[in-house]
């Protein structure tokens, strides 16, 4: 855990993600990424030199998923937890019968989450995107949109005044998976009908296959994103490339 918290702390420092007095909401889907982020931020809160408040928020899509384990985890780490009930899934799959549901689902979930954050007076939203997510998003933009782009480590949402932060960008997906298993985190089964049938899943498979021939492919892409740099991707701290952990 100390190793992961070190990587998270380095990312937070490099991109100035957390300031004293911040009220940070963690978007918790119930998946391993958001649960690991929650635990690491809860641990960081105990010794970070800039005191901040933390709360977990889940947008319930209306798929009948059980978040009782997440609730227990939040209680164990002394993190307030709120579940926002919605009918996003029935609207998309039953009423609209969307053939490509991911884009609309993402917008509706983000809208519900941003509204909850504004209602509660948070100024920052922490999201569980990790190292591999960044590389995949970069390639998705290149392959499917014909542009060089990726989400930013820190994003200012002008319309709401909320700042999105992604503190796990220096942590590989394999490391996240292993940590979630070792900590026995209560990962919630994803009941989305479109799960693993997305363009991201295709790009993940492509990267895996290419990495068999070019083992440092992900590291080269991630480094290029910082050196280019993409807007807001150049780190301000002393960045050292994270190695993938078994």
Image (cartoon, grey):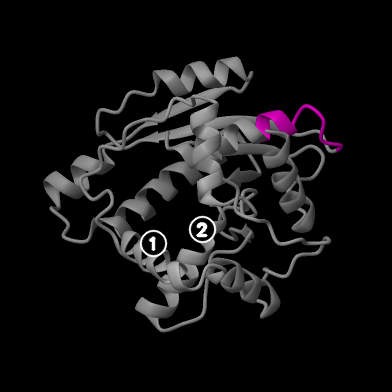
Against 97, residue 181 (above or below) is above
Tag 1 or tag 2, which sits nearer the N-term?
A: 2
Q: Does 45 sit left or right of 124 as displayed?
A: right
Residue at horizontal 64%, vertical 18%? 78
Q: Mark 1 points at which residue?
A: 204
User: For this rendering, which residue is in front, 69 or 154?
Assistant: 69
User: For this rendering, which residue is in front, 183 or 209?
Assistant: 209
Q: Does the magenta stretch include residue 59?
A: no
- Location of the N terminus by quadrant is top right
Q: Mark 2 points at which residue?
A: 132
Mark 2 → mark 1, Cα distance in angstroms: 9 Å
The segment highlighted magenta reads 41-49
- Considering every residue shown, the one lying at the far right of the view is 49
Tell me whether circle 2 and circle 1 mark residues in contact (CB < 8 Å). Answer: yes
- Location of the C terminus by quadrant is top right
Measured as percent of width and height from the top left, residue 90 is found at 19, 41
Classed neighbour count for the residue bearing mark 2: other residues with Cα under 10 Å, few (<14), some (14–19), many (≥20): many
Residue at horizontal 67%, vertical 41%? 4
Against 143, residue 126 (above or below) is above
Classed neighbour count for the residue bearing mark 1: other residues with Cα under 10 Å, few (<14), some (14–19), many (≥20): some
Against 188, residue 110 (above or below) is below
Residue 175 visible in image = yes
Measured as percent of width and height from the top left, residue 110 is found at 43, 49
Residue at horizontal 67%, vertical 35%? 41
């Amino acid at each position: 855990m100390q190793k992961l918290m070190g990587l998270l702390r380095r990312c937070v420092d490099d991109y100035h993600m957390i300031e004293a007095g911040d009220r940070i909401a963690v978007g918790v889907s119930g998946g391993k990424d958001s649960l690991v982020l929650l635990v690491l931020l809860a641990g960081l809160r105990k010794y970070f030199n800039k005191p901040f408040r933390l709360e977990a928020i889940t947008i319930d899509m209306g798929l009948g998923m059980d978040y009782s384990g997440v609730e227990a985890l939040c209680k164990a780490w002394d993190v307030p937890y709120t579940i926002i009930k919605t009918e996003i899934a029935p609207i998309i799959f039953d009423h609209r019968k969307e053939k490509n549901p991911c884009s609309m689902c993402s917008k509706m979930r983000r809208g519900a989450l941003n509204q909850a954050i504004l209602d509660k007076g948070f100024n920052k939203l922490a999201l569980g995107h990790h190292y591999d997510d960044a590389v995949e998003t970069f390639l998705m933009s290149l392959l499917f949109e014909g542009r060089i782009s990726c989400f930013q480590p820190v994003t200012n949402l002008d319309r709401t005044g909320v700042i999105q932060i992604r503190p796990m960008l220096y942590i590989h997906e394999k490391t996240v998976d292993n940590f979630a298993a070792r900590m026995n985190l209560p990962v919630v089964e994803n009941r989305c009908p479109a799960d693993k049938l997305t363009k991201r899943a295709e790009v993940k498979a492509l990267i895996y296959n290419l990495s068999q021939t070019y083992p440092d492919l992900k590291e080269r892409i991630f480094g290029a994103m910082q050196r280019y740099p993409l807007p807001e991707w150049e780190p301000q701290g002393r960045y050292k490339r994270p190695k993938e952990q078994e």
